[in-house]
Image: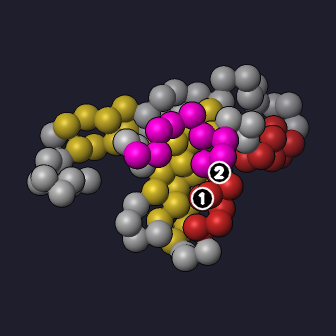
Amino acid sequence: FTTKDKNRYRLMLNHVWDLKYSVEDVQAGRFKELMEHSQADLAQSSIYAIEDSDYIRFFENEVSGTQPIEKIVHYVMTDAANTLLEFLTVREPVLARL
């Protein structure tokens, strides 16, 4: 992606175990709810780690114990076009400047 200052970056997601993607205005309520559990400073980031995640609990139920969930982190990414990307991963995302 490209920032307002024309700097280019690539966000790399490794070991993604599940993914949700949506573009819609109704995400505002969902996003507010997620941020109540966020570890991030909202003024400085558009990618958030979610604590006490319903998504992780849902995933745990769906995989019926076939995958370990102890190290899974629920991340949420947003942009100005009402895009909401949620993913579960066991590795931190890597941001690289191009």
Q: Residue at x 65, y 66 (%)?
A: 29
Question: Between residues 3 and 61, which one lies in front from this camera angle?
Answer: 3
Disc 1 residue type? Phe
Q: Disc 1 to disc 2, how far (Cα)? A: 5 Å
The dominant secondary structure in magenta is: loop
> How far across and down, in percent of the image, does residue 95 sit?
32, 35
Q: Residue at x 86, y 42 (%)?
A: 61
Quarter of the image for residue 50 reads: top right
Residue 17 disc label: none
Dot 1 lies on which element?
Answer: helix
Question: Between residues 34 and 61, which one lies in front from this camera angle?
Answer: 34
Whether residue 36 is in magenta: the answer is yes
Q: Give the colouring mode of the picture.
A: secondary structure
Region of the chain picked out in magenta, as a range: 35-43
Question: Between residues 30 and 17, which one lies in front from this camera angle?
Answer: 30
Q: Residue at x 48, y 29 (%)?
A: 92
Q: Are marks 1 and 2 in contact (CB under 8 Å)?
A: yes
Q: Which residue is mark 1?
A: 31
Check the picture and name the quadrant holding the C terminus.
Answer: top left
Question: In this rendering, does residue 60 appear at all?
Answer: yes
Q: Which residue is mark 2?
A: 34
Q: Residue at x 56, y 42 (%)?
A: 75
Local packing at callout 1 (Cα closer than 10 Å; few below 14, some 14-19, many 20+) is some
